[in-house]
Amino acid sequence: MSKIIYLVPLFPLIGFLINGLGRKFLSKPLISIIASGAILASFIVSVLLFINVKNTGSISAAYFDFINFANVVIPFAFQIDQLSSLFLLIITGIGFLIHLYSSAYMHEETSHHYARYFAYLNLFVFSMLLLVMGANYVIMFIGWEGVGLCSYLLIGYWFKNINYTYAAKKAFVMNRIGDLGFLLAVFWLINKLGTVAYVDVFANVSKLSQADITIITTLLFIGAMGKSAQIPLYTWLPDAMAGPTPVSALIHAATMVTAGIYMIARSNILYTMAPQTQAFIAVIGLATALFAASIALKQDDIKKVLAYSTVSQLGYMFLGLGVGAYTGAVFHVMTHAFFKALLFLGAGSVIHAMHHEQDIRKMGGLKKYLPITHITFLLGCLAIAGVPPFSGFFSKDEILTAAYAKNPLLYYFGMAGALMTSFYMFRLYALTFLGKFRGTHEQEHHLHESPLAMTIPLLVLAALSVVGGFIGVPEVFKADSHWLEHFLSPIFAQSAALTESHHLSHSTEYTMIGTSTALILVTIIFAWKKFSNYVPNEGENEGFNKLLANKWYVDELYNSIIVKPIELFSGLLKNVIEKNVIDGAVNGVGKLVVASSRQLRLIQNGQVGSYILIMVVFIIVFLFAWINDLTIVRFFNKLF
Amino acid sequence: MPIQYYIYLALTLFTIGIIGVLTRRNAIIIFMCIELMLNAVNLLLVAFSKMHNGIALVTNKDSMVGIDAQLFVFFIMVVAAAEVSVGLAIIVMMYRNTHSIDVNFLNRLKN
C-alpha cells in the first residue's frame, strides 16, 4: 500500500502543470475536468490509504535524500498515519467539491484566466498535501511555504484591482513573519537533536532540556499564529477575502488555515511537555476567539463576517490544543471544514446571484429566490452555532469541556464567544435570507438559484455538517462512542501517558450541555427576531459599535506602529543612505579612476626621450632585481 | 688579453650610447649613439666568441664552438645598415618639414 502514497500529491501536481502550461490552448470544460479530475483521483487514493491505515496502522515511504550533509540527513519521505490520513480526506474531499463549485462560479472568466485559477488551486492542493504527508518538519515546511505562496496568488487573483494586490501582499508578509518562527524551530531541532523526522524527534524528546522544548514549541506556535491567523498576526485573513469566494472556502476556511492546528497536533508530545507554551496557546486562542467574534458582530460584508468567524473558530481550536484536547481540536478542524466551507460556498452562491454584491444590508428576503442555498446555509449556521445534534455542537462541546476541566474561567469566556458566534451567524442569516429584499430592482429581477455544479457541493457539505459530528459523540451520552478519539489515539498516546485525565462527572457535563444549548437557542431566537425585519438606518455607528465596526482599529494601530515607522526608516535609507553613502561609494570609485587617469595621462607626453628614459630606468631596475638574488623571479615562481 | 677588458670597453661604449640617446636632441647624434650601442654589443659578441673558441681549440684544433656568435654580428651589421638607410630617410623628410632635426619637435603623431 505504501507504493501508492506518492500518487496522492502527484495528481494535483500534474493537473497544475497541464493547466498552467496549456492555459492558452485548453477550453474551459476541459480545464475544469482536468483540475477536478486530478483532485478526485487524489481523493480516491486517499480513501484507499485511509482504509488501509484504519485497518493496519500507519505506513510510510522514503524516496530520496532531500538534504544530506555533515551528519544531518533529511529524506524526502511521506508518513501516512491516522492524523495525516484524516487530513488527506478533508483536503482532497472538500477540495474536490470546491473545484466542482469553482467550475461554475468562475465561468465568467476568460479561458486563459480560468486555467490560471485552476492551476493555482491544484498547486495549492499539492502543497497542502505535502504539508500533511511529510514525514519530517522540513517536508512540512515545503508545503507550509507552498500553501502560503498559493494563498498569495489566489488572493491576488484579480490582480487588476490594486487593493486586492495589497491584500495578497499583506497575507504573504504576515505569513512570512510566522514562517520565520517555524524555520527557527526547525534549526533549533537540528541543532539539538540532529534530526527533524517526526519519529526520531518524538522518540528522543526526553533528551531535550525543558528550556529547549519551551523555545521550540513557542517558535513553532509563532509559525502557527501566522498561518492560522491568531492574535497578533490575524489581520491578513479578513483581507484575504479579496480572493474568489471558493478560494476563501478552501484555503481561508477549510484547509490552509488549519495547518497550524495540524502542526501542533502532530507535535503534541512536545507541547504536552511544555506547559507554559500550552497555557500561552490557550490564552492566545481564547483571546482570538473572543476578539474576532466581537468584530464579526458589526461587519456588513457577508464574507468579512465569515472571515472573522473563521478566525474566531481557529481560536477555539487553539484553545483546545492549549488545554490538551488534541482530539477535540482535530475534530473541530474537521467539522469546521464542513460547515465553514458550506457557509462560504453558500455566500458565494448568494454573491453570484446578487451580481457581486457583498453588503448584507442590501440583501434580504433571498429565501424564496435561492431555496437550496437558503436551506443549506441555515444548516451551516446551526452547525457553527453549536446547536445539537449538528456537527459543530459535538466538537465545540468537546473543546469547551476540556477547557472547563483545566480552568472554569476558560470555559466561561469560551461560552461567551460561542454565544457571540450564534448571534452574528443568525444576524448574517436573517439579514441575507429573511425580511424584504433591499437591493435594486434590477438585482431583484436577475435573482436566480445557482447551477447544479454549485448546489451539489452545497448539499454534500450540508449533509456532512449535519451528520459529521456523530463520529465524536461524547462519553456522557454513550460509552465508547467517540470513534474519532479511538481512531486518533495512537497519535496522541505519548501525550496521553503524560497527562492524567480528569473526567468531569456526568451530571456536570449534562448541566453544561443543557445550559449552553439553552443559551445558544435564546441568542439565536433573539438575533432572528431582531434582524428578520431589518430596516437599514442611515445613522453612523457610535461608541462601542463604531469601535467594533472598525475592527477595534487594529489595522490602523499596526499601520501606525509598524508600517509607518518601517516606511519612515525605508525613506531614510532611500533618500539619505542610498543617495549619499551607496551612490557616493559607487560614484567615488568612478571619480577616483577618472582623476587618477587624468594624472597618469601626463606621462604619455609624446617626447620620445622621456619614453626611452623610462624604459632604461626600468631595465636597470629589473636588472638589479634580477641580480639581487632573482627576488622577483622567485616571487613569481612562488605566486604560480 | 683578459675578457674583462673587452667587457669594460663594451659597457663603456654602451653607456655612452645610452646617455647620448637620453640627453641629445639632435637626431643624427641620437642615431650615432644607437650605432654605438649596437657596436658595443657586436664587440661583446665577438669577444665571447673568440674566448669560447679559444678554450675549445685546446682540446680540438678543428673546433667550431662559439663561431656562430660572429655570424650574429654580421646580421646585426646588416640590420643596422638597413636601419640607417630608413632612419636617414626619415630625418631628411623631417628636415624638409620642420627645418630642424630636433627630436623634441616630434611630440605628436598628427600634423
Image (cartoon, rainbow, N blue to C red):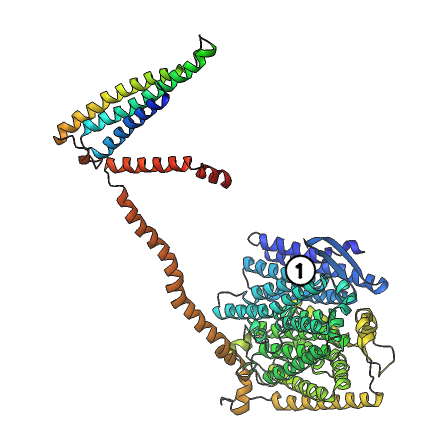
Count of marks placed on residues:
1
Asked if B68 appears above or below A83 in the picture, the reply is above
Q: Position of residue A230 (x, y in %)?
A: 63, 76
Q: Chain of mark 1?
A: A
Disc 1 crowd rating (10 Å Cα; few below 14, some 14-19, many 20+) is many
In front: A546, or A441?
A546
The residue wearing badge 1 is: A126
Q: Quadrant of residue A193?
A: bottom right
Callout 1, which amino acid? Phe
- Residue B75 to residue A570: above or below: above
Residue B53: image location, x then y, percent = 41, 14
- Place residue A249 in its image quadrant: bottom right
Q: Residue furthest top?
A: B62
- The N terminus of chain A lies in quadrant: bottom right
User: Residue at image x 60%, y 63%?
Assistant: A150
Q: Furthest-left residue in view?
A: B99
Question: Where A60 falls versus A346 (above or below)?
Answer: above
Pinpoint residue A492: horizontal percent, then vertical percent: 79, 72
Is A317 placed left or right of B86 in the picture? right
Residue A458 seen: no
Residue sitting at the far front: B1
User: Could you tell me which secondary element the residue under label 1 belongs to?
Assistant: helix
Query: Looking at the image, which is closer to me, A178 or A146?
Result: A178
Q: How far from the left and from the top, in percent, is residue A637?
A: 49, 38
The answer to whether one can see residue A284 in this image is: yes
